[in-house]
């Protein structure tokens, strides 16, 4: 469940120029996202928070989504990706900000809350929970990057970052950045990341 049975083409636009292996949720407390410099009072992510309550109610909001997730579980499995309705509902609930830095409108919730949220999602659809777990780790990891990289990644509310842990690519310096090329058999969540 949650792993496509076919190769997925790479996306033309990458949110980050780094791939890393991370095999666990953010440590408690997550040290990296609290380290960035002052990013100003208002970011796009801060503005998106106006229509979503704080982290304290995150688990409760996700519990309300279980019927929707369950209704879309077979379609998610069949399509090899989380349904757009699930992605939209999870974004509205604030799930994708779960491990994002507070300085960018994220919640930086403790591991206990992450596990509760992911378990609630899994009650509706295990594949959707798996993808959310991958995004959670990717977003946390992006919070460990330089301030400049964080500003780019978190310039969009509800940034979703996915990871590839297999070292099968080649990163080459170019004018103004890097070019990452390679071949990966799958990348959980890449179609919506």
Image (cartoon, rainbow, N blue to C red):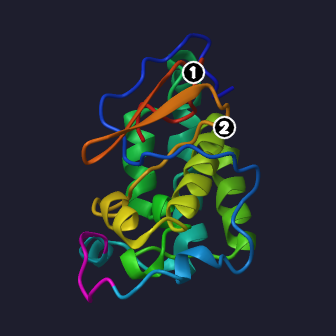
Q: Which mark is residue 165?
A: 2
Q: Quadrant of residue 168?
A: top right
Image height check: is 167 above or below 151?
above
Q: Nearer the viewer, residue 187 or 97?
A: 187
Image height check: is 22 above or below 57?
above
The percent position of residue 52, horizontal first and vertical second, equals 36, 72
* Distance (Cα) linking label 2 and label 1: 10 Å
Image height check: is 97 above or below 182?
below
Identify the residue at image location x=54%, y=75%: 33
Number of residues whose C-alpha sits closer than 10 Å to that of mark 2, classed few (under 14), some (14–19) or many (20 or more): few
State which quarter of the image contains the C terminus. top left
Q: Nearer the viewer, residue 45 or 154?
A: 154
State which quarter of the image contains the N terminus. top right
Q: Nearer the viewer, residue 82 or 160?
A: 160
The range drawn in magenta is: 39-45
The percent position of residue 41, horizontal first and vertical second, equals 26, 89
Q: Which mark is residue 184?
A: 1
């Amino acid at each position: 469940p949650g792993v496509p049975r076919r190769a997925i083409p790479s996306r033309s636009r990458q949110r980050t120029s780094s791939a890393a292996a991370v095999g666990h949720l953010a440590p408690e407390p997550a040290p990296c996202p609290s380290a960035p410099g002052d990013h100003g009072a208002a970011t796009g992510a801060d503005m998106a928070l106006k229509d979503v309550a704080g982290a304290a109610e995150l688990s409760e909001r996700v519990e309300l989504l279980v019927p929707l997730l369950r209704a879309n579980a077979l379609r998610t499995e069949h399509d090899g990706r989380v349904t757009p309705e699930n992605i939209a509902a999870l974004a509205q609930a604030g799930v994708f900000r779960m491990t994002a830095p507070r300085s960018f409108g994220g919640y930086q919730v403790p591991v206990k809350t992450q596990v509760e949220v992911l378990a609630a999602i899994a009650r509706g659809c295990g594949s959707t929970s798996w993808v959310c777990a991958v995004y959670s780790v990717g977003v946390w990891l992006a919070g460990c990057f330089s301030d400049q990289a964080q500003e780019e990644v978190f310039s969009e509310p509800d940034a979703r970052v996915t990871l590839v842990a297999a070292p099968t690519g080649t990163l080459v310096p170019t004018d103004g950045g890097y070019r990452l090329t390679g071949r990966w058999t799958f990348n959980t969540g890449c179609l919506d990341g």
